[in-house]
Image (cartoon, rainbow, N blue to C red):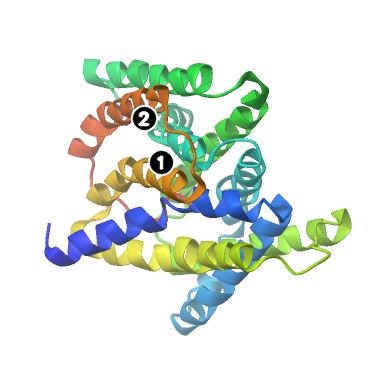
Amino acid sequence: MTRRGVVLFAALGVAWGIPYLLIKVAVGELDPAMVVLARSALGGLLLLPLAVHRRQVLVVLRRWRPLLIYTAVEIVVPWYFLSTAEQRLPSSTAGLLLAAVPLVGVGVAFLFGRPERLSGANWAGIVVGMLGVAALVGLDVAGSDLVAVGQVAIVVVGYAIGPAILSKWMPDLPAVGVVTVSLLIAALVYLPVVLLTGALPTEVPSAEVIASVVTLAVVCSAGAFLIMFALIAEIGPVRTTTITYVNPAVAIVAGALVLGERVTVWTAVGFGLVLVGSYLVTRRRRARAAPEPKAAPLLD
C-alpha cells in the first residue's frame, strides 16, 4: 500500500470508528430522531453542490425504487435504532456488535441469489463470530439492555442488506450521487417525524452536543465518503472493505478515553472472536472476488 493509501485508510478508520462515541454524546440531550435528521440533512447538503456539479442527482433519481429501499435499510431505520440503542448501551459495545455485519452478509448473499460456496474456514468463521457476539451480549451486556442489543441487531441486518442492494440494482450509479440523495431523502423522512413527535429540542443544546452532531455529518458522513472514494481509487474496493476490522477498535479506544467506558475481559474476548470470525468468513470471498462496483458501503 502506498503512503497515500495508508493515510487515507487511517483517516477512514477514524471517521467510521468515532460515530458511536459521537452518537452517545448527542443522544444525551437530543432525541434520536433529531440526531438522525441533523446528521443526514447537514451531510446531504454538504455533498449536494458536488453531486449537482457532476450532474449525478437526476441520474440517481431515475432509479428511485431501489434507492428508496436502500435508503430505508441503510440510513432511515439503522441510524434511528443505533441512536436509540446507544441511550442504553456503551458506545464501544455498539461498535463491537456492528462488527458482525460481514457474518450477516453471508446470509444476505443467499437471500439475494448470490450464494457463496463456503469452505471449512468460512464455516469456522461463522461459528467463531457468533461466539464473539454471544460473549458480548451474554457476558458483557446487562440483561436489561437486551432490547438495545436487539435494536443493534436490526442495524447489523440493515447494514448487510444495503450494499447488496447497491450491488444488485444500482452498481452503475455514481457513488456521490447515491450518498447525497439518500441522505437528503432520510432528512425529508425525519423532518415531519421530529416536528410531529416533539423531538425538536426546546433549548439550544450544549456546545459538546452541537460539535458531536456537526462532526457526525461533516466528518463521519460527507467527509468519510469522499475519503472512501479516494481510497477505492488508490487500493481498490476489495481491500477497502478491510476497514470493517478497524472501526470497532477505534470505537473501544474512543469510548474508553473520552467517556470512561469500561473495557472488560469479555469485551476484549468478544472483540477478538468477532474480528477473527469476520476475517474467516470474508477471506475466501475477497480472495476470489471479481472487481466490485464502486458502491457506497456502511453509513455508520
Where residue 157 appears, as percent x and y from the top left, is 53, 34
Where residue 129 appears, as percent x and y from the top left, is 37, 23
Say which residue label 2 marks.
271
Spatial distance from mark 1 to mark 2, Cα to Cα? 9 Å
Residue 206's disc number: none
- Residue pictured at 33% horizontal, 23% vertical: 273
Nearer to us in this view, 276 or 189: 276
Q: Secondary structure at mark 2?
A: helix
- Residue pictured at 67% horizontal, 42% vertical: 84
Give the amino acid type for the residue marked by disc 2 in the picture. Phe
**How many numbered circles does the render carry?**
2
Give the amino acid type for the residue marked by disc 1 in the picture. Ile
Nearer to us in this view, 175 or 208: 208
Q: N-terminal of the two: label 1 or label 2? A: 1
- Residue pictured at 27% horizontal, 53% vertical: 237
Say which residue label 1 marks.
252
| 43, above or below 100, in the image | below
In contact (CB < 8 Å): disc 1 and disc 2:
yes
Check the picture and name the quadrant holding the N terminus.
bottom left
Where residue 299 appears, as percent x and y from the top left, is 49, 53
Task: Tell me if 105 is positioned left or right of 125 in this view.
Answer: right
Asked whether residue 174 appears in the rendered view, the answer is no
| 268, above or below 295, in the image | above
- Residue pictured at 21% horizontal, 30% vertical: 284
Task: Tell me if 84 is positioned left or right of 127 in this view.
Answer: right
Q: Secondary structure at mark 1?
A: helix
Quarter of the image holding residue 101?
Answer: top left
Asked whether residue 230 appears in the rendered view, the answer is yes
Q: Characterize the local packing of mark 2: few (<14), some (14-19) or many (20 or more) Cα atoms within 10 angstroms.
A: many
